[in-house]
Image (spheres, rainbow, N blue to C red):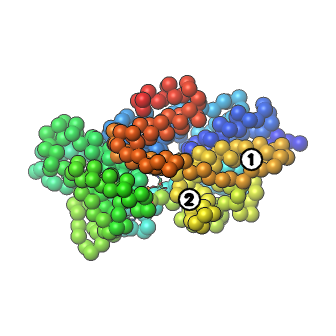
């Protein structure tokens, strides 16, 4: 029998955990494993709010793929996927010949959800990858540098963050940490800078523990953050944002953190999706395609207890990748596959270098203790990718 071909798309949390699992479990030549990713590095999405605000260099949030994979067992192709042809069992790439597969793992992550809000795609910025966060940081710095040269316009030092979900909150927390240094550098009094976090729901972090939300809001307000709650952004222009009711806030920097949807390639493949995400079966396979596994932000897994989908997180993507690797090995060896069961270990959100809020197991935590926990979670990801050597190489700034 021909060696089965496994193609993994995306070197994010889901794709890398699949590949790392496969390279540990498979014998040489038991399968031909190919990983495709548009960059030759993995970016640690859960750290991207830091380089976006300029509190850490972007390089801290990226790892060369060749430092993670065993090239004797996994072939890496750096290229952009342009189409997934399910009927032909092929993946089309921008620069290389199409790839055929026996098993396909889709881990292509998400895209910003803009809900059709006019002007967002054109005028707002997004915390998405290394390039987008470098641009946000440099844009903010350039706007601050213009302040004294362009009539001390308030909009130049006004930063609007649209959406107070976890991404918005983590970014605002980093901005608080960054402001003293940035204000000193450009001779701008800190109290003149406006950091405005706008949220459509009546509360920050809708659905999260109210006591921890209250802790975060008080911490932010003490540090000069303005919240606008129950106030959806309805339009984004070159000059700023327009809120429901017509109020305009002039801001030279608008960062949209209002939510995500699945990668559009998944929708375009013909699979049925909800907000770009595929409702997968108990083995994380696409309906009608037992050879196609959809993981991470492009997949939809329901919590059986409340019939609601789990939010797309690195935590679930990681566990999905681990499950998928096991099941691919079982499929190749004619064994029994294991259903995916999500084990929610908790949620910790950083509010800056020394502040965080979170729930781990049944314990609530905040402040310095939660910030340390957040660092431990980041170190664990490095450990899963490459053991102690990876922790020592890439994790020093976290310790
Ligand atoms: P990703 O990690 O996004 O990886 C997708 C990969 O596919 C990327 O490498 C991308 O370059 C590649 N790709 C995409 N399109 C193509 C293409 N066409 N061709 C080739 N390659 C392509 N979750 C948590 O659980 N905890 C946290 O603390 C946390 N913090 C976060 C902080 C921020 C600022 C953000 C934005 C998100 C955070 N999340 C967190 C959510 C988490 O990052 C995502 O749920 C997670 O990254 C999803 O993993 P994934 O493998 O599906 O996709
Ligand atoms: P999200 O969907 O969780 O939050 C988006 C927020 O934007 C919501 O509160 C929503 O009400 C608000 N919003 C939507 N439209 C709006 C509008 N027009 N005007 C103003 N506000 C609007 O998205 P996210 O924060 O990007 O998170 C994406 C996923 O990543 C989630 O699953 C989240 O749990 C996960 N994440 C986790 C962490 C962590 O665990 N530390 C950190 C970041 C992200």
Q: Position of residue 35 (x, y in %)?
A: 65, 41
Q: Is residue 256 left or right of residue 337?
A: left
**Which quadrant would the C terminus be assigned to in this image?**
top left
Q: Can you see residue 194?
A: yes
Q: Which mark is residue 327?
A: 1
Q: CA distance from mark 2 to mark 1?
A: 21 Å
The yes-or-no answer for disc 1 within 8 Å of ligand 1 is: no
The local secondary structure at tag 2 comes to loop
Q: Name the residue at the right extreme.
A: 1
Q: Is residue 392 above or below residue 223?
A: above
Q: Nearer the viewer, residue 91 or 20?
A: 20
Say above or below: 31 vs 310: above
Can residue 92 be seen in this snapshot?
no
The location of residue 379, given as percent across then percent down, is: 50, 34
* Dot 2 or dot 1, earlier in sequence: 2
Which quarter of the frame holds ligand 2? bottom left
Q: Position of residue 292 (x, y in %)?
A: 71, 54
Q: Name the residue rendered at 71%, 38% in the picture.
A: 22
- Residue at image point 42% right, 57% down: 209
* Residue beneath the point at 41% across and 53% down: 166
In the displayed structure image, the side of residue 228 where residue 260 appears, left or right: right
In this rendering, the label closer to the viewer, 2 or 1: 2
Residue 310 numbered tag? 2
Can you name the residue that lies furthest to the front here? 362
Q: Position of residue 4 (x, y in %)?
A: 80, 43
């Amino acid at each position: 029998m021909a060696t089965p071909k496994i193609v993994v798309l995306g070197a994010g949390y889901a794709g890398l955990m699949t590949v790392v699992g496969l390279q540990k479990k498979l014998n040489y030549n038991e399968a031909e494993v190919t990983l495709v990713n548009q960059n030759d590095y993995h970016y640690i999405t859960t750290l991207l709010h830091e380089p976006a605000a300029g509190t850490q260099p972007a390089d801290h949030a990226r790892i060369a793929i060749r430092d993670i994979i065993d090239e004797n067992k996994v072939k890496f192709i750096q290229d952009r996927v342009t189409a997934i042809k399910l009927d032909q069992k092929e993946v089309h790439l921008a620069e290389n010949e199409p790839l055929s597969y026996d098993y396909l793992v889709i881990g292509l992550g998400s895209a910003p959800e803009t809900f059709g809000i006019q002007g967002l795609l054109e005028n707002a910025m997004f915390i998405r990858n290394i390039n987008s966060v470098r641009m946000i940081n440099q844009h903010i710095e350039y706007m601050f540098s213009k302040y004294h040269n362009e009539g001390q316009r308030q909009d130049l030092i006004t930063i609007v963050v649209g959406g107070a979900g976890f991404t918005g909150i983590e970014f605002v927390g980093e901005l608080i940490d960054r402001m003293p240094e940035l204000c000193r550098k450009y001779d701008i009094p800190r109290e003149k800078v406006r950091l405005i976090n706008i949220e459509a729901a009546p509360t920050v972090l809708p659905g999260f523990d109210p006591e921890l939300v209250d802790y975060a809001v008080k911490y932010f307000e003490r540090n000069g953050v303005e919240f606008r709650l129950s106030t959806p952004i309805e339009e984004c222009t070159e000059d700023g944002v327009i809120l429901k009711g017509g109020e305009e806030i002039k801001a030279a920097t608008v960062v949209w953190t209002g939510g995500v949807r699945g990668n559009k390639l998944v929708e375009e493949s013909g699979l049925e999706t909800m907000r770009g995400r595929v409702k997968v079966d108990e083995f994380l396979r696409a309906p009608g395609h037992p050879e196609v596994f959809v993981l991470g932000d492009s997949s939809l897994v329901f919590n059986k207890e409340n019939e609601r989908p789990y939010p797309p997180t690195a935590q679930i993507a990681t566990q999905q990748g681990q499950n998928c690797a096991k099941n691919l090995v079982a499929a190749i060896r004619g064994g029994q596959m294991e259903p995916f069961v999500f084990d929610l270990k908790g949620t910790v959100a950083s509010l800056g270098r020394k502040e965080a809020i979170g729930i781990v197991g049944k314990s609530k935590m905040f402040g310095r203790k939660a910030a340390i926990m957040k660092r431990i979670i980041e170190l664990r990801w490095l450990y899963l990718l490459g053991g102690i050597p990876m922790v020592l190489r890439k994790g020093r700034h976290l310790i």
